[in-house]
Image (spheres, rainbow, N blue to C red):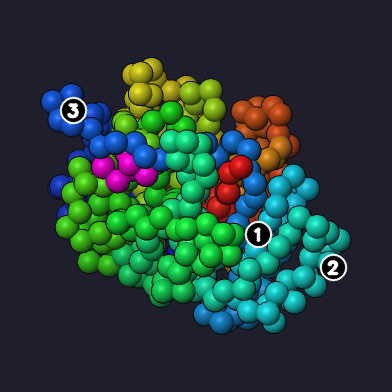
């Protein structure tokens, strides 16, 4: 379980107190005086055609029956939304869980024609962070990359989830390419044209219980991102740390690239409330593509009210809509039973005129720090 949603003004205070002098916000471009790392693979845009989507279904074995039951409806809703336009690959903890999930789907009339199951134990549900990354080779072949996962710097148990990429590779007849770096999928955003955005706190930190790669420098990380993702320009936000955010400020709750040279984010006040420093906001708002053309900014609101779970628990913080997932013919948007759901859904619909926007109730998932993008992983065609 991760709790990354509690990002309030308290979070901003906590961040400012952290020792982060070495995490200055920068935009990195290739140095023409130094040899470039070769691009071996590229990361297809999330909006490109999918073969399917991977989900790790909630179970009772790590955090109990109440945890599992509180999340089932969100996974059913995602499966129902996705199955008509792409395959849904569900990782079930065991055969007992598989049977239970099949019954849940049958109860609401979700056909299993495009749904398949793989049986493997998991620690939790965050397949965006621990799952495989599907990239393309220079010849256009889809490959599966295993970046390694260590529970966001060894904050939670992770061994079962770390094994998922290699397991999936064995199940679908691919060879997992082992990347010599730990990195969560939610820690990076790519524009599909060579630009990667991330926070240093979630990628480069050397703080206790936040370290993904001991001793790794920014240059070494960038070399891996160039080689395996095809990134040639880097936009680094400083990010920050909070006891309430185990991800150490993943970028996928802050900003998202969409087709048309656009960058979806929030307004200045909401980003400050979300815990981002003003220097990071300035860098974000001035971001440009590899040709130094400024991205067109699109602003989504936070929820109007603090999020309240389905059992009536007031979480005390607002909901974020940035963490949407682009699927075949659809966009799945986190919704909170809030007046701003319709506002956010409408803005996103305007960005994707050929896709249907489907709101996914994530109120209970949000209590544990996640939204739609956090728990989905695309497999491109």
Q: Which label's residue is closer to the chain start, 2 or 3? A: 3
Instruction: Determine which of the numbered discs, if any, sits on residue 205 in the image.
Output: none
The residue sitting at 22% across, 66% down in the picture is 208
Residue 54 drawn at (x, y percent): 60, 57
- Circle 2: element type: helix
The residue sitting at 20% across, 54% down in the picture is 216
The residue sitting at 47% across, 44% down in the picture is 135
Which quadrant of the rendered structure holds the C terminus?
top right
Which residue matches tag 3? 31
| Foreground label between 2 and 3 | 3
Q: Is residue 33 visible?
A: yes
- Circle 3: element type: loop
Q: Mark 3: give few (<14), some (14-19) or many (20+) Cα within 10 Å.
A: few
Q: Which label's residue is closer to the chain start, 1 or 3? A: 3
- Circle 1: element type: strand
Residue 315 drawn at (x, y percent): 53, 62
Q: Which label's residue is closer to the chain start, 2 or 1? A: 1
| Foreground label between 2 and 1 | 1
Horizontal side of 3 relative to 352 (left or right) equals left
Residue 338 versus residue 32 in the image, above or below = below
The residue sitting at 34% across, 19% down in the picture is 292
Q: Mark 2: give few (<14), some (14-19) or many (20+) Cα within 10 Å.
A: few
Instruction: Determine which of the numbered discs, if any, sits on residue 89 in the image.
Output: 1
Which residue matches tag 2? 107
Q: Main secondary structure of the magenta part?
A: helix
Residue 31 drawn at (x, y percent): 18, 28
Q: Which residues are magenta?
A: 223-228
């Amino acid at each position: 379980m991760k709790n990354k949603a509690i990002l309030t003004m308290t979070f901003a205070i906590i961040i400012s107190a952290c020792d982060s002098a070495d995490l200055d916000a920068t935009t990195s471009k290739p140095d023409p005086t130094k040899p470039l790392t070769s691009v071996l693979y590229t990361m297809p845009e999330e909006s490109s055609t999918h073969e399917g989507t991977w989900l790790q279904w909630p179970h009772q074995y790590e955090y109990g029956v109440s945890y599992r039951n509180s999340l089932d409806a969100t996974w059913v809703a995602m499966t129902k939304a996705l199955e008509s336009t792409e395959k849904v690959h569900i990782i079930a903890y065991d055969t007992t869980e598989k049977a239970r999930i099949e019954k849940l789907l049958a109860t609401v009339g979700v056909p299993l024609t495009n749904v398949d199951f793989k049986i493997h134990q998991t620690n939790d549900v965050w397949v965006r962070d621990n799952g495989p990354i599907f990239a393309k080779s220079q010849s256009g072949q889809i490959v599966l990359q295993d970046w390694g996962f260590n529970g966001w710097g060894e904050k939670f148990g992770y061994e079962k989830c770390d094994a998922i990429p290699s397991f999936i590779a064995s199940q679908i007849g691919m060879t997992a390419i082992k990347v010599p770096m730990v990195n969560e999928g939610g820690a990076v955003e790519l524009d599909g044209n060579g630009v990667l955005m991330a926070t240093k706190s979630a990628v480069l930190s050397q703080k206790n219980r936040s370290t993904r790669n001991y001793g790794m420098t920014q240059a070494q990380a960038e070399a891996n991102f160039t080689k395996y993702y095809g990134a040639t320009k880097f936009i680094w936000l400083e990010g920050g740390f909070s006891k309430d955010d185990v991800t150490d400020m993943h970028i996928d709750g802050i900003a998202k690239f969409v087709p048309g040279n656009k960058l979806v984010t929030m307004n200045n006040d909401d980003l400050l409330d979300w815990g981002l420093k003003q220097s990071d906001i300035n860098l974000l708002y001035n971001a440009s593509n590899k040709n130094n053309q400024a991205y067109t900014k699109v602003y989504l609101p936070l929820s109007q009210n603090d999020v309240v779970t389905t059992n009536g628990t007031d979480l005390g913080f607002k909901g974020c809509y940035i963490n949407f997932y682009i699927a075949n013919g659809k966009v799945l948007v986190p919704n909170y039973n809030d007046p701003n759901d319709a506002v956010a859904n409408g803005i996103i619909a305007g960005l994707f005129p050929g896709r249907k926007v489907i709101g996914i109730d994530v109120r209970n998932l949000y209590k544990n720090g996640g939204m739609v993008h956090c728990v989905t992983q695309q497999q491109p065609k």
